[in-house]
Image (tube, grey):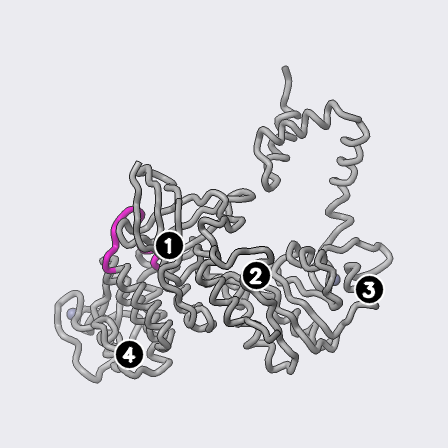
Amino acid sequence: MRRIESEALLLRSIELGETDLVVTLLTETDGKLACIVRGGRRGSHRLGGALEPFHTMHVAIDDRGRDLSTLREARIERVRGRLVSTLEGVEAAGACLRWARHLFPVRTPEPQGWTTLVALLDAIDEGAPPRRELAAAALCLLTDAGYGLDFERCVRCGKPCPHGRPAAIDTVRGGLVCQACGGARRVIGSDARLLAYALQNGERPEASTDDVEILVALAEDAMAVHADLAS
Amino acid sequence: MNTGKLTRLTKLLARLPGVGEKTAQRYVLFLLTADEVVARELGRELSALRDNLQPCARCGNIAEVDPERAETICSICADSKRDASLLCVVARVHDLMAIERAGTMRGRYFVLGKLLSPLEGVGPEQLPLGKLTARIETDGVREIIVATPPSVDGEATALFLKRELEPFGVSLTRIASGVPHGGDLEFADPITMGRALSGRQRI
Ligand SMILES: [Zn+2]
Ligand SMILES: [Zn+2]
């Protein structure tokens, strides 16, 4: 048995019987893990109210290398009180953690994915617009998981997309597809494409609500290509 | 030994929350060997349960079906001494019962049946908001106590209700949360302590 000590985010919590919980955590060191929490439902003193999403926890896990590990300790390391006080913040952060749960395989360290999620939660907690941060994090999560969308050049022939022109995006093929290569059904405006490119590169330009929503929907579609988002 | 019927009942009982196979078997053997009246009465009550008790048409609480009435109404909604202008919104019937046990709630209830869950993708469209707003109008509700649990889902639901119900001009309050009665401040987690401080009251 191995003891894992790591920072972690709660991705899911399911009641098991009268007293226990099964939680899915994204740990910084070991990636996604499912753990049983004995007595977790009654809010045991040891774990207190620590098992809440959106705050960064420090956890101690006994890992047997298969199926369910056991969560031994959890305490809140960083409280994100501002995030959880707005509905928009909670909804955006919740959507992103849900996608991360579907996208990341178990027991695989996700250093980039971890950084993306922590950056999203911190940004929303510091008052950044939640939907724009969600669009940025969703596009980055795709990249982190190896499914990044290319908004710069055609994924088939490599031709750069001309400025000021609408762009056809194929989520299955992983980004732009130029006219000559057959285009794609989904077409986004030039501003949305530039915004996507900027967000992927860590910039945070002013953005219209419409463009932000176009990118959130696009990223969600791309995730659905690679993971079953309904489960 | 033919134990098909025994196994069947054991398996059914084991589906109840908190009951494992072993406990279920103990129940079955008890019912077989103890006073026959217990087993027969339990059987009668169980088979009539779903016909006799149904969700209250107004609030979602458990209500006894009255064949004389078209609508099934719970004892709280039927109680004319209850203040109709005060409505307490809860997630589940369990929570309603817990509040009733405290004995200080003089208004009526509305059971949501579920909470928003950002992590599980349960969105506002899955809450019975239309039924709740209709209740506000028909009953002339003036104050709503949002008694969803102090969890992220409970808070998200409270924030959502605030946004949706404010236009109705009702006074919206949220149950307090913080360090428990008889609790030790030393052991309070940072979230609980933060809430206890932000929700402090003048003494
Ligand atoms: Zn091309
Ligand atoms: Zn009722």
Q: Which residue position holds label 2? A: B149
Disc 3 beta carbon < 8 A from ligand 2?
no
Task: Read off the chain for label 2.
Answer: B
Q: What residue type is labelled 2?
A: Pro
Local packing at callout 2 (Cα closer than 10 Å; few below 14, some 14-19, many 20+) is some
**What residue span does the magenta drawing correspond to?**
A100-112
Q: Which residue position holds label 3? A: B79
Q: Which residue position holds label 1? A: A228
Q: Residue at x 53, y 68 (%)?
A: B124
Q: Which is nearer the eye, A29 or B65?
A: A29
Q: Residue at x 51, y 62 (%)?
A: B153
Q: Are marks 2 and 4 on the same chain?
A: no
Residue A4 percent location from the top left of the image: 30, 45
Q: Which amino acid does label 4 sit on?
A: Ala
Task: Read off the chain for label 3.
Answer: B
Mark identifier at residue A59: none
For residue A75, side relative to residue A191 (left or right): right
